[in-house]
């Protein structure tokens, strides 16, 4: 007589793990949405055609030198790659079961970050936010490079916990592509509700997002780092 083993009953997921999965799912959904939107817009027509339709920021780059136009396309493509791949780095099951794939995705992500940051610095002179954009988006690009480098250096040194902390910070900056658009819509909506003209509402909102799109992200990232017990920054005692 043969016997069959009783079916394995999976223990209920820890509430914290469940919340983390839901949060990562929301992040991945928003990231993929922005990625597909950006690629569909800038891959569907030339900058001149997009500028004529007043699509995105094409108007500022349609009249720019070919160098800046090329850098813009490099920035869009590499930033979208980083934005879409980033959430995969935080899937614990993938890290455990497919470590080689995890490393491959990580290398691709960090390569896209490096190219996205450098091309982002290259287009600063023609950004649509003026001097505020130079400082805000410039700081974002530099920190994007720094966090990616620190994540790479940590994992090459075998420090997994520090690597994870820096990857969280890195993707928080990558996610600025999403939060920029969320803040832009929120700020414009508030102004339009108060009777502002659409062009003025956009100009005012876009003047704020060069810093607003990433500073709160870093605050949230550091909170996540501390909650997970990873190496974090601590203010000096006074």
Image: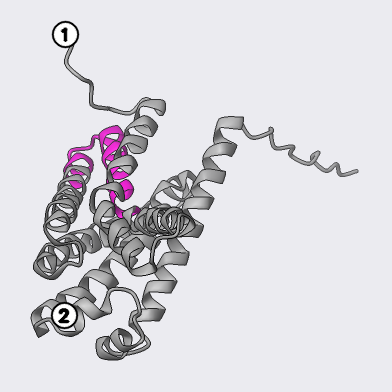
Q: Is residue 168 magenta?
A: yes
Do we see residue 204 in this rendering? yes
Q: Position of residue 188 (x, y in %)?
A: 40, 58
Which residues are the magenta region? 152-175
What residue is at 47 percent from the left and 49 percent from the top?
97
Considering the numbered disc 1 on the image, is that residue within a helix, a strand or a loop?
Answer: loop
Q: Position of residue 171 (x, y in %)?
A: 32, 49
Q: Is residue 78 magenta?
A: no
Q: Position of residue 1 (x, y in %)?
A: 91, 43
> Where does label 1 land, which residue?
238
Tell which residue pokes out farthest to the front in this image.
Answer: 195
Give the quarter of the image for residue 6: top right
Which one is nearer the viewer's eye here, 148 or 6? 148
> Where does label 2 land, which residue?
70
Q: Position of residue 34 (x, y in %)?
A: 42, 65
Q: Is residue 122 above or below residue 44?
A: above
What residue is at 40 percent from the left and 61 percent from the top?
196
Q: Is residue 7 above or below residue 53?
A: above
How far apart marks 2 and 1 lie (CA) works out to 49 Å
Which one is nearer the viewer's eye here, 69 or 160? 69
Q: Is residue 218 above or below residue 130?
A: above
């Amino acid at each position: 007589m043969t016997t069959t083993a009783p079916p394995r009953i999976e223990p209920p997921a820890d509430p914290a793990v469940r919340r983390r999965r839901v949060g990562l799912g929301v992040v991945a959904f928003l990231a993929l949405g922005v990625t597909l939107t950006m690629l569909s817009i800038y891959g569907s027509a030339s900058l001149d055609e997009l500028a004529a339709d007043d699509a995105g920021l094409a108007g500022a780059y349609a009249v720019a030198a070919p160098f800046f136009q090329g850098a813009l396309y490099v920035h869009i493509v590499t930033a979208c790659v980083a934005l879409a791949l980033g959430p995969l780095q935080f899937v614990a099951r993938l890290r455990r079961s497919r470590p080689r794939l995890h490393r491959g995705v990580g290398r691709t992500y960090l390569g896209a970050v490096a190219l996205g940051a450098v091309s982002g610095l290259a287009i600063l002179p023609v950004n649509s936010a003026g001097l505020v954009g130079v400082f805000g988006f410039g700081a974002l690009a530099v920190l994007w490079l720094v966090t990616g480098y620190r994540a790479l250096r940590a994992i090459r040194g075998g420090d997994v916990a520090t690597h994870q902390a820096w990857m969280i910070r890195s993707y928080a900056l990558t996610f600025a592509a999403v939060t920029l658009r969320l803040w832009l819509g929120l700020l414009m909506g508030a102004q339009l509700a108060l009777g502002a003209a659409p062009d003025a509402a956009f100009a005012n909102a876009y003047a704020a997002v060069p810093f607003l799109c990433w500073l709160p992200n870093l605050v949230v990232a550091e909170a996540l780092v501390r909650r997970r017990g990873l190496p974090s920054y601590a203010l000096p005692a006074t």
